[in-house]
Image (cartoon, grey):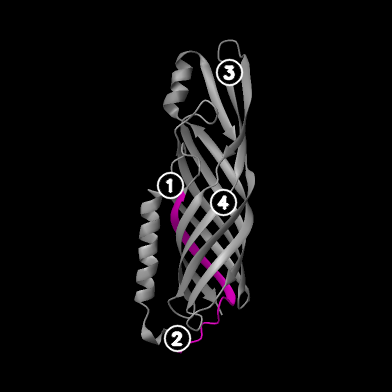
Amino acid sequence: MIHSILRAAGLGALSLLIALPASAGAQDYDGPMGTGVGLAAGYAKPSDSLYSGGVSGGLVFSIGLWKYLALEIQGGYFGSGVQGSNEGLSKGKLTVIPIQLSLQGRYPVNEGRLMPYLELGGGYYLNSFAVDSDLVDDWERVGFALEEKVEGAFGFHFGAGLDFFLSRNFSLGLGFKYCLVRMNGSWSLTDNAGSTEVTGDLEDLKLSPLTIALRLRFVFK
């Protein structure tokens, strides 16, 4: 699935470059200077093979610090279906809300209309997990209540992308980002009749999603 998305994204970027008008360089687009706000949408896939990928979305806020340097804050969202395992989470739905701060090194091309970039940064990941309802019902039928939780976690990320300025103020971009993050959690199994509870910890769960996204920004200049 990821390979197909990468191929499609590569073809999309190539088509974008081929379609650029010959007069693209007639206007100076000022590099990344200016403050930008926008939307991002794409696909995110955690590294753990037991976690499925899902549609991602988010908001982007960027500040051009210098011709070759920009600061970006992004808040996102994606969901992942979990198959379940004895060592990790049970079957269910994982929801992730990453809040990321990135430093981007940019290199303006074609008078600034094309903007390839590399980025590096860190962030905090707000995580939540809901056990599959059928699994919860199975435990309820034998007199037990199952609950599992995951905690938020800090992480680092790096990536690359390409922004194309449709006009002086609007840009369309394609970006790839890999995040290094692991999370902890806990589980509990309670006897509904006697209120006896057994608990345990879930440690070092690998999240580390790869995100591929398109984004549309308006840049105030």
- Do the numbered discs 2 and 3 sit on residues whose CB atoms are within 8 Å? no
First reached walking from the N terminus: tag 4 or tag 2: 2
Q: Which amino acid does label 3 sit on?
A: Thr
Category of crowding for the residue at label 1, using alpha-carbon neighbours closer than 10 angstroms: few (below 14), some (14–19), many (at least 20): some
| Residue that mark 4 sits on | 179
| Residue that mark 1 sits on | 54
65 to the left or right of 15: right
Q: Position of residue 217 (x, y in %)?
A: 49, 69
For discs 2 and 1, the disc positioned in front in the rendered view: 2
Q: Which amino acid does label 2 sit on?
A: Gly
First reached walking from the N terminus: tag 4 or tag 1: 1
Tag 3, which secondary structure? Answer: strand
| Residue that mark 2 sits on | 25
For discs 3 and 1, the disc positioned in front in the rendered view: 1
Q: Position of residue 93 (x, y in %)?
A: 47, 37
For discs 4 and 1, the disc positioned in front in the rendered view: 4
Tag 2, which secondary structure? Answer: helix
The residue stretch that appears in magenta:
25-44
Q: Residue 190 carries which label?
A: 3
Residue 134 is a magenta residue:
no
The residue located at (54%, 53%) in the rendering is 178
- Do the numbered discs 4 and 2 sit on residues whose CB atoms are within 8 Å? no
In depth, the one of 144 and 123 nearer the eye is 123
For discs 2 and 3, the disc positioned in front in the rendered view: 2
